[in-house]
Amino acid sequence: MLAELLATGASGEMLPTLAKNLGVFVLAIMLGFEVIVKVPPTLHTPLMSGSNAISGITIVGALLIAGAHFEGHPWINVVFGFLAVMFAMINVVGGFVVTDRMLAMFKRK
């Protein structure tokens, strides 16, 4: 993608798409940061369970991307799809471990 952008120059058709995607990415980061900062500490454990469900949806989307056939370089889809599945699985497993440890704190001995 970057090689195509450099090859076509600034007047190419790819630049507006790249700019839009980067703009959406930056806005998502800022929105996510603002939402997470405003959450009180007592709600972090229930929200972790909710984020596990969202990560499950991310895994399904990553599997679809990895298996999709796009024009150009199909190995890029497999590589980024694999990375997305790997990071989402780390997030899901870590979320369940943290939730389990937090709930163990409230069990009677």
Image (spheres, rainbow, N blue to C red):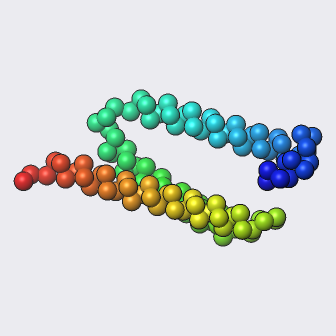
Quadrant in the rendering for residue 9:
top right
Q: Residue, x 71% and y 63% (percent of image)?
A: 76
- Residue 105 horizontal side relative to residue 3, left or right: left
Residue 83 appears at what percent x and percent y?
58, 61
Q: Foreground: 9 or 19? A: 9
Residue 94 appears at what percent x and percent y?
38, 55
Residue 56 at least partly seen: no
Q: Residue, x 92% and y 40% (percent of image)?
A: 11
The single residue placed furthest to the left in the displayed view is 109
- Above or below: residue 71 compared with residue 55: below
Q: Residue, x 43% and y 31% (percent of image)?
A: 37
- Residue 59 horizontal side relative to residue 10, left or right: left
For the image, the number of numbered tags is: 0
Residue 96 appears at what percent x and percent y?
34, 56
- Residue 91 horizontal side relative to residue 108, left or right: right
- Above or below: residue 59 compared with residue 22: below
Residue 100 at least partly seen: yes
Residue 54 appears at what percent x and percent y?
48, 52
